Image (tube, rainbow, N blue to C red):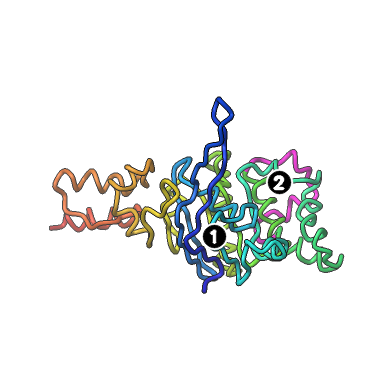
């Protein structure tokens, strides 16, 4: 069993129509996902695909209507496991302003660990380590309100890091950021994953953030539409477009060239790959 596993996960929520009648909406419909420790996983899907509802199950913010969610051996349906699960799986949300609670950076990073009753010396050590991991050590005494969007999100990630989770789940963490901020956050996540072995589950609709993932799950209408390595996913351009997703520029360009009769392999995702293939064709 992996660090994160869902078995036939179903989640329904109740809304009301204009006549105050209850309407049951199925947000997740029979989801089976298995994530191994140390993987960098991306979950893709358009708005309303169920990916945010899925993310909230991994931190026990939501509980299944039916089916099972297990985080590092802990069943999220058991209320006694809630706080243990939240130590194992830290959650970073779309808007860092909703997650940052202190005025000074290092105080904010320490907040979660303090609530876990971690000893003071250990908190100091964890804060130093977490700030270093996201390249924010030089900003430790800065006012949080004076940071850029990307810097705030990195502080939010550091706050989760200081709690020392096995896994970090990020629900659209770059949605409100400019391209520079997006790049800062994704680079910090890749560094944490590669150097610290922390499992990362990134929920997004930005295809370029998925290029270097170990595995991708594409969601649509609460189900897994397709899953696999990036090269497999991006070879299914028509399917992705039907699911309301864009594809990386390189993949789109290769796709258009193939439609014009140029012989290129499936699933090209990197610029240097495309250049190499075009050069080969030119030399022929």
Q: Which callout, 1 or 2, points at the residue further toward the start of the chain?
A: 2
Q: In which quadrant of the rendered view does residue 199 lie? A: bottom right
Comparing labels 1 and 2, the label whose residue is closer to the camera? 2
**What numbered label is drawn on residue 220?**
none
Indicate the position of residue 183 as horizontal and vertical percent values: 53, 48
Q: Nearer the viewer, residue 213 or 283?
A: 213
**Closer to the camera, 219 or 259?**
219
Residue at image point 60% right, 52% down: 56
85 or 23: nearer the eye?
23
Name the spot of residue 49 as percent of width and height, x first: 45, 45
Give, as a single range, the part of the protein colored magenta: 132-149
Q: Residue at x 64, y 54 (%)?
A: 91
Residue that badge 1 annotates: 190
Q: Secondary structure at mark 2?
A: loop
Q: Residue at x 57, y 33 (%)?
A: 16
Residue 269 within the segment the image draws in magenta: no
Q: Nearer the viewer, residue 93 or 136?
A: 93
Disc 1 and disc 2 in contact, CB within 8 angstroms: no
How packed is label 2: few (under 14 Cα within 10 Å), some, or many (20 or more)? some
- Residue with the mark numbered 2: 99
Q: Is residue 30 visible?
A: yes
Q: Quadrant of the C terminus?
A: bottom left
Q: Is residue 133 magenta?
A: yes
Residue 91 higher or lower than 195, as above or below: above
Disc 1 crowd, CA 10 A, few/some/many (<14, 14-19, 20+): some
Location of residue 87 in the rendering, given as x and y in whole percent from the top left corner: 70, 64
Q: Quadrant of residue 226?
A: bottom left
């Amino acid at each position: 069993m992996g660090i994160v596993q869902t078995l036939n996960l179903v989640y329904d929520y109740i809304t009301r129509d204009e006549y105050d009648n209850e309407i049951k909406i199925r947000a997740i419909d029979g989801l089976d996902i298995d994530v191994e420790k140390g993987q960098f996983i991306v979950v893709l899907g358009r708005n309303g695909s169920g990916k945010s509802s899925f993310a909230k199950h991994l931190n026990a913010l939501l509980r299944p209507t039916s089916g099972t969610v297990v985080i590092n051996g802990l069943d999220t349906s058991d209320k006694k496991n809630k706080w243990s699960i939240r130590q194992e799986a830290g959650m970073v949300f779309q808007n860092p302003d909703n997650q940052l609670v202190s005025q000074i950076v290092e105080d904010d990073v320490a907040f979660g660990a303090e609530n876990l009753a971690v000893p003071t010396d250990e908190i100091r050590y964890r804060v130093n380590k977490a700030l270093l991991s996201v390249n924010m050590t030089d900003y430790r005494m800065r006012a949080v309100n004076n940071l850029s969007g990307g810097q705030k999100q990195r502080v939010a990630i550091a706050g989760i890091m200081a709690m020392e989770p096995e896994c970090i789940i990020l629900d659209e963490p770059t949605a409100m950021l400019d391209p520079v901020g997006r790049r800062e956050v994704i680079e910090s996540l890749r560094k944490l994953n590669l150097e610290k072995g922390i499992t990362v589950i990134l929920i997004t609709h930005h295809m370029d953030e998925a290029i270097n993932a170990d595995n991708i799950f594409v969601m649509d209408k609460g189900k897994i539409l397709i899953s696999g390595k990036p090269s497999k996913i991006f070879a299914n351009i028509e399917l992705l477009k039907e699911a309301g997703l864009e594809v990386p520029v390189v993949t789109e360009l290769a796709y258009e060239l193939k439609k014009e009769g140029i012989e290129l392999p499936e699933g090209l995702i990197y610029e240097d790959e495309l250049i190499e293939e075009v050069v080969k064709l030119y030399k022929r």
